[in-house]
Image: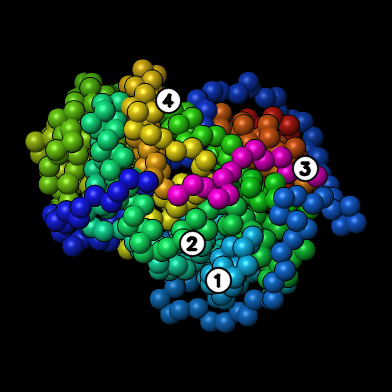
Amino acid sequence: MRRRPPIRPAGVTAAVVAVAALVTGCTVGPSSRPPLATYGQQPTTVTSASPSARPTGPGGSGQQADPLSWGSCPSDLATESVDGVAFTLECAHLPVPGSYTESGSGSEDLAVVRARTDKTPADAPNLVLLSGDPGANGTAQIADLAGALPADLRAGHAIVTLDLRGTLPTNPRMDCLRSDTLQEVLAPPTDPSDPDQAAAIGTLSTALTYDCGDEVGTTITDFGTVNAADDLDTLRAALGDDRLQFVGQGFGATLGAVYANRYPGRVQRLVLDSPTDPAASLTDTALARAIALESALDDYADQCAADSCALGADPKKYVTELIATLGDTGGSAGGLLMTGGSVLLLLSRELGDPEGWPQLTKALAAADGGNGDLHPMMALLLRDLGLDDDRHLLESNIAYTCNDAGQRLSEASLAQNAAAAKKKAPVFGAFLIGQAGLCSDWPTAVLPLGRVTGAGAPPILVAGSNADPISPYSGVQSVVSQLSSAQLISWQSGAHGTFPASSCVGNAVQSYLIDGTEPAAGLLCPP
């Protein structure tokens, strides 16, 4: 581990303290389109392993927990979704060990919430829902999460979610980065194939590690997906359920895959929407996502040009010149520094949401090639990353990303990988390799992820968009190939997340969760 650099003057406004996000998207494999599937095949009914023959995975036969003590929720917790769906909420706290493998490791206290509509029976089965990056969608978002589900699904299930370990408000200790470190993460180097920029990534990694290490201590390695999967099974036990019904999207889907591998005998029905490959290295993940983002940028530029957008006749040229003009020095954006790296962060999030492209175009156009108003881009970036509500997602995502990965990059290796990636993905390749380098000085992973098989689990549905730049399709395919009972649903789309955005995927998921019916093999949903 490098020596901690001297503390620099903050040099940014106090608002930076409320700004936090790590965007090293965890995906693997270049996007590829699946062969067209034929429709009309008869669905099959899901068969589950009998309790007497329940398979046992790495996590054992299952966790034990006292029943949850449900009570009223905080008064500021929304009970109505943005679409006007009203819920009755119950809240509880779930105690879990700091480490499942080391005695005397202390404990964490995870907030849990359960939502029912006025049509949901009191004895309705539980459906656990986790969406997005760690901390992005927790108990505070329960009404919107449940409200986005199809009406029949939420009417027949009690919807449950929790705040994962290492996320606010569950664990305030993860509020651990200094304001100048936060600013540097929001304006990272654009091209670490240059040795000086690779060294800057190394210095930033050192600062990240020391900031959080000084604040959190040795338990910093406890915040990862393996422990979160064990927490998920503890939740299952505390809910009084013999087996788990679960829908995960993005990171939630990856967590579900790890859960199936650790507790195959405790799986009832799992839907994994846009997972990433737990066995992929940081650099493989970064390269795969960079390649997918290049294609997404081309699609965005083509659509923008066809609509006579404000970026001119060649929108891609406008974007790449904006990144180069801002470079690593950038300009002021509402008291924060907006650089070329900041623009790349923004694009890496927005390109997976085609419905948001018009707003992205407005923000890019306002920058006037780097000589205009940079604040709209920064405001959009902060909104996309959930950085305007003081949830400190940055620390949570750093912890999960680095604790899940066995790979650590030296400065020389970082520069070499960035140079190779730039040849395959000129806009995003080197930059995303640099994001992978943020883990360089993090402590060695205690429970790194690897291949998942879920041997003996009942059928599991895995869904993915075949042009998704956030969770590239080949990563979804890799998860399917590893899980012994996975069935793939593909959506012809560039959007990140398929359910419930695609009605075709939604119908298949509802039939599976409500009736226990699998979709036709190889189902390919239209745009």
Disc 1: which residue:
106
Decide whether residue 453 is among the magenta residues: yes
Q: CA distance from mark 3 to mark 2?
A: 31 Å
Q: Is residue 186 visible?
A: no
The residue segment tinted magenta is: 443-456
Disc 3: which residue:
455
- Tell which of 135 and 319 is nearer to you: 135
Q: CA distance from mark 1 to mark 2?
A: 9 Å
Disc 2: which residue:
219
Horizontal and vertical percent position of residue 304: 29, 28
What residue is shown at x 35% (from left), y 28% (from top)? 412
The amino acid type found where label 1 is placed reads Gly
Give the mark, 1 or 4, whose residue is nearer the N terminus: 1
Horizontal and vertical percent position of residue 464: 57, 36
The amino acid type found where label 4 is placed reads Ile
Q: CA distance from mark 1 to mark 3?
A: 32 Å
What residue is shown at x 58% (from left), y 57% (from top)? 228
Give the mark, 3 or 2, whose residue is nearer the N terminus: 2
Dot 1 falls on a residue whose secondary structure is loop
The amino acid type found where label 3 is placed reads Ala
Q: CA distance from mark 1 to mark 4?
A: 42 Å
Give the mark, 4 or 2, whose residue is nearer the N terminus: 2
